[in-house]
Amino acid sequence: MRIYDDLQLDYCDVLLRPKRSALTSRSEVNIIREYTFKWCPKTIKATGIVAANMATTGTFEIAKVMQANNLFTALHKHYSVEELTKFLRQNKKEHGNNDLIFISTGVNDKDFEKLQVMMKTKLVNNICIDVANGYSPYLINYVKQVREAYPDSLIMAGNVVTGDMCEDLILNGADIVKVGIGPGSVCTTRKLTGVGRPQFSTVVECADATHGVGGMVCADGGCTVAGDLCKSFCAGADFIMLGGMLAGHDESGGEICTKTFQTNELEPVGQNAYQVKLEEKTYKKFYGMSSQYAQEEHYGGMKKYRASEGKEVNLPLRGPLEPTILSILGGIRSCMTYIGAKRLKDMPKCATFYRVSRQLNTIFD
Ligand code: 5GP
């Protein structure tokens, strides 16, 4: 029996050490990075935050807000060819290009057929190849197939959590490897299967391996606050994919429901008569893409041999997405001034971490 003894860390297990820095203001740092890739010949200037290709976050509405802030979106794969084409055509007119948009695909023949149709439109060049278990041979074979068919496309593929597999994916045609198994906010893989790896250690190892062969890494899942994104960029992530942090907003997908609660207050009803005051709260559904809810919603029911590896939650409505995004970007800029990183790309080389047993004071939470 082999047991890896090295302590595996999550974002909550570390904090960044502040450093003497000549940067005096957040306005002196640049969070726009010029991305160049191993295979795709294109250069893209943006901040490497990607809305997850979940049905609730990889939406057209979210894409517009992300794009307006120089951030990416991986559109979910449940949009039809017609819907995608219409959006991409319009977006190209409005924004000038679709460089910040990925279309998503699974790895079966039907997925490839749809991808071929989409690529024929020449409206989009970025492809997110997504399977829950990136260790299956289907993923590597599919990456090879897509790279052969579209040599100039930008390919992101995953998910895996080890350096060896990252190298394989890059060498077989991926530009970006997506890493993370089980860290997601609505993921139950670790609970159900016992498989996974703490995300901070995953990013550190995978970034090192991936950069070694000229690729890039996208840290997928597990960010709960802006500080987690700062730690992730510092650990070596070139891109970070977000689900939960973008969910529950006006632009997010998901059913809206209202619940009624009893309060501690009484309200008068007529003379000398009172009743418990009720309060209504509105929620938006957010669900894992392999949750039972998603299976029913998008695949017409749960297959018997499959287990649900995701859950559904109702989030209190959070209003428009833009303030959330601005606060995340503000956090990253501020972190850069704390550690003396002038450019996003410089964050890992400016970073030193403390391993901690407690990172937050939660007395008033
Ligand atoms: P979050 O930012 O919410 O922590 O994580 C988002 C990521 O969780 C997604 O990009 C995806 O990789 C992962 N994810 C989404 N739905 C599911 C699911 O049903 N099961 C599992 N295992 N992972 C999921």
Image (cartoon, helix red, strand yellow):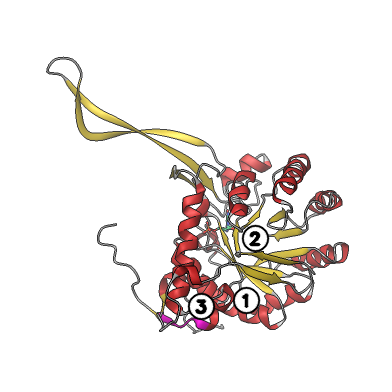
Query: Which numbered disc covers residue 130?
Result: none
Label 3: which residue?
Answer: 341
Dot 1 lies on which element? loop
Q: Name the kind of residue labelled 1 in the image.
A: Thr
Picture layout, residue 165 above or below residue 128:
below
Would the CB of label 2 be found within 8 Å of ligand 1? yes
Q: Amino acid at mark 2?
A: Ala
Q: Choose mark 1 or mark 3, whichever is in front.
A: 3
List x then y, in percent, for residue 120: 86, 51
Counting from the top left corner in percent of width and height, residue 152 is at: 83, 65
The answer to whether 253 is drawn above or below residue 128 in the figure is: above
Q: Quadrant of residue 130?
A: bottom right
Mark number for residue 162? 1
Considering only order in the chain, which callout, 2 or 3, is on the residue closer to the N terminus? 2
- SS for callout 2: loop
State the image coordinates of residue 203 (x, y, percent, origin top left): 56, 74
Residue wearing tag 2: 132
Left or right of 351 on screen, residue 104: right
Residue at x 64% of width, y 60% of height: 132
Give how far apart the Cα atoms at labels 1 and 2 are. Answer: 14 Å
Q: Mark 1, residues whose alpha carbon is within 10 Å: few (<14), some, or many (≥20)?
A: many
Give the magenta range.
350-354
- The disc labelled 3 sits on which kind of residue? Ala
> Is 272 or 65 nearer to us in this picture?
65
> Can residue 365 be seen by looking at this rendering?
yes
For disc 2, the neighbor class at 10 Å (few under 14, some 14 to 19, many from 20) is: some
Q: Is residue 237 magenta?
A: no
Quarter of the C terminus within the rendering: bottom left
| Marks 1 & 3, CB-CB < 8 Å contact | no
Placement of the N terminus among the 4 image quadrants: bottom right
Q: Regarding mark 3 in the picture, which secondary structure is present there?
A: loop
Residue 4 in sight in this render: no
